[in-house]
Image (tube, rainbow, N blue to C red):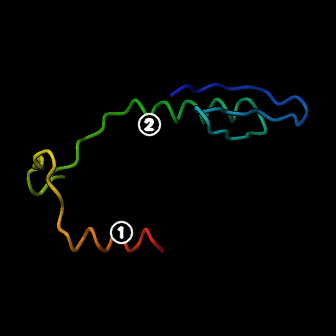
Amino acid sequence: MIIEITEQLARHRWLVQMDVWEVGFDSRDEAEAFVRQLKARINAPHAWPANTVTKPLLRQPAGARSDPAVEQRVLADLAR
């Protein structure tokens, strides 16, 4: 993620840009404090969730189809 601080001269505000998102602040100190907190959270250790997958993910053979009843419901929803 690219994080930058820029000044909006016309409005006398500071923008923190995070890729395509922007957050405005009234002072550079506020913007810098936000960036410090954001970077601390990004860089903090994160534990993997326990038992996220309850059953193994199986690949279907090439050309295999799903349940026909489910396919019909999906197609009906798409037609609406």
- Give whichever of 30, 1 is nearer the camera: 1
Mark 2 in CB contact with mark 1 (< 8 angstroms): no
Say above or below: 21 vs 28.
Answer: below
Looking at the image, how many numbered discs can be counted on the residues?
2
Q: Residue at x 23, y 42 (%)?
A: 48
Q: Earlier in the sequence, mark 2 or mark 1?
A: 2
As helix, strand or loop, the secondary structure at mark 1 comes to: helix
Q: Residue at x 65, y 32 (%)?
A: 17
What crowding class fits label 2: few (fewer than 14 Cα within 10 Å), some (14-19), or many (20 or more)?
few
Between marks 2 and 1 in the image, the one whose residue lies nearer the viewer: 1
Q: Amino acid at mark 2?
A: Arg
Residue 33 spot, x, y in % from top left: 61, 33
- Give whichever of 64, 15 is nearer the camera: 64
- Give whichever of 36, 67 is nearer the camera: 67
What crowding class fits label 1: few (fewer than 14 Cα within 10 Å), some (14-19), or many (20 or more)?
few
As helix, strand or loop, the secondary structure at mark 2 comes to: helix
Q: Amino acid at mark 1?
A: Leu
Say above or below: 78 vs 24.
Answer: below
- Give whichever of 64, 10 is nearer the camera: 64
Residue linked to disc 2: 41
Mark 2–mark 1 distance (CA, rounded to whole Å) = 43 Å
The part of the image, by quadrant, that contains residue 71 is: bottom left
Say above or below: 51 vs 48.
Answer: below
Which residue in the rendered view is the most extreme toward the right? 10
Residue 66 spot, x, y in % from top left: 18, 61
Q: Which mark is residue 75?
A: 1
| Left/right of residue 43 with respect to residue 53 in the rendered view | right
Q: Residue at x 64, y 25 (%)?
A: 4
Residue 55 spot, x, y in % from top left: 9, 56
| Left/right of residue 25 with respect to residue 44 in the rendered view | right
Say above or below: 13 vs 6.
Answer: below
